[in-house]
Image: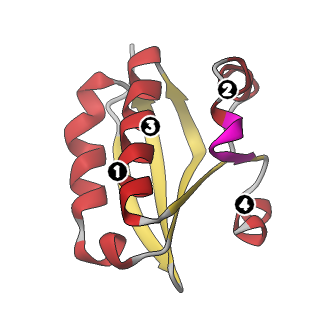
Amino acid sequence: MRANSQISVRHEGKIAIFDITGYLTDASEAILSDAYADVDVQAAEKVLLNFERRSFITSSGFGEIIRLLWKMREKGQVLRVAHPSTQVRNIFNTIGLTQSIGVFESEEEALEDF
């Protein structure tokens, strides 16, 4: 059974960190859009998607990340990903998203890369 996705947002200076729990799927579009629409997130220069909390991304979820990336590029924001599972990291590499999004083993590494 797939866990419903949840996103909590916290801030480190000009960086908005999305702590994602559960499966990121096409059904997560509203949750991801709502988190991104927050005034403080809109003012952030950078966004970090943190998958440390046993999260997984379906193919539709990758589509949601790509849509988020497009919105962020229009605003001049930068996107990074932290703590993906090995399988998710391999998919990021296979579909070429690592060329547009920095993908890191830890939150600390991702924050340092910004």
Which residue is denoted by mark 1 in the rendering?
Answer: 71
Please tell me which of labels 1 and 2 falls first in the chain: 1
Using the rendered view, name the quadrant where residue 4 is placed. Answer: top left
Magenta region: which residues? 98-103
Residue 24 magenta: no
The N terminus - image quarter: top left
Please tell me which of labels 3 and 2 falls first in the chain: 3
Query: Is residue 63 or residue 21 the one in the foreground?
Result: 63
**What is the spatial separation of the Cα atoms under label 4 and label 2, in whole angstroms?**
18 Å
Residue type at mark 2 is Gly
Which residue is denoted by mark 2 in the rendering?
Answer: 96
Would you say the residues marked 1 and 3 are in contact, meaning their CB atoms lie under 8 Å apart?
A: no
Residue type at mark 1 is Lys
- The relative height of residue 14 versus residue 65 in the rendered view (above or below) is below
Please tell me which of labels 1 and 3 falls first in the chain: 3
Would you say the residues marked 4 and 2 are in contact, meaning their CB atoms lie under 8 Å apart?
A: no
Q: Secondary structure at mark 4?
A: helix
Label 2: few (<14), some (14–19) or many (≥20) C-alpha neighbours in 10 Å: few
Please tell me which of labels 4 and 3 falls first in the chain: 3
Which residue is denoted by mark 3 in the rendering?
Answer: 65
Q: Which one is in front in this view, the residue at disc 1 or the one at disc 4? A: 1
Residue type at mark 3 is Ile
Q: Which one is in front in this view, the residue at disc 4 or the one at disc 2? A: 2
Residue at position x 28%, y 33% in the image: 28
Q: Which one is in front in this view, the residue at disc 3 or the one at disc 2? A: 2
Residue type at mark 4 is Ala
Which residue is denoted by mark 4 in the rendering?
Answer: 110
Residue at position x 53%, y 34% in the image: 55
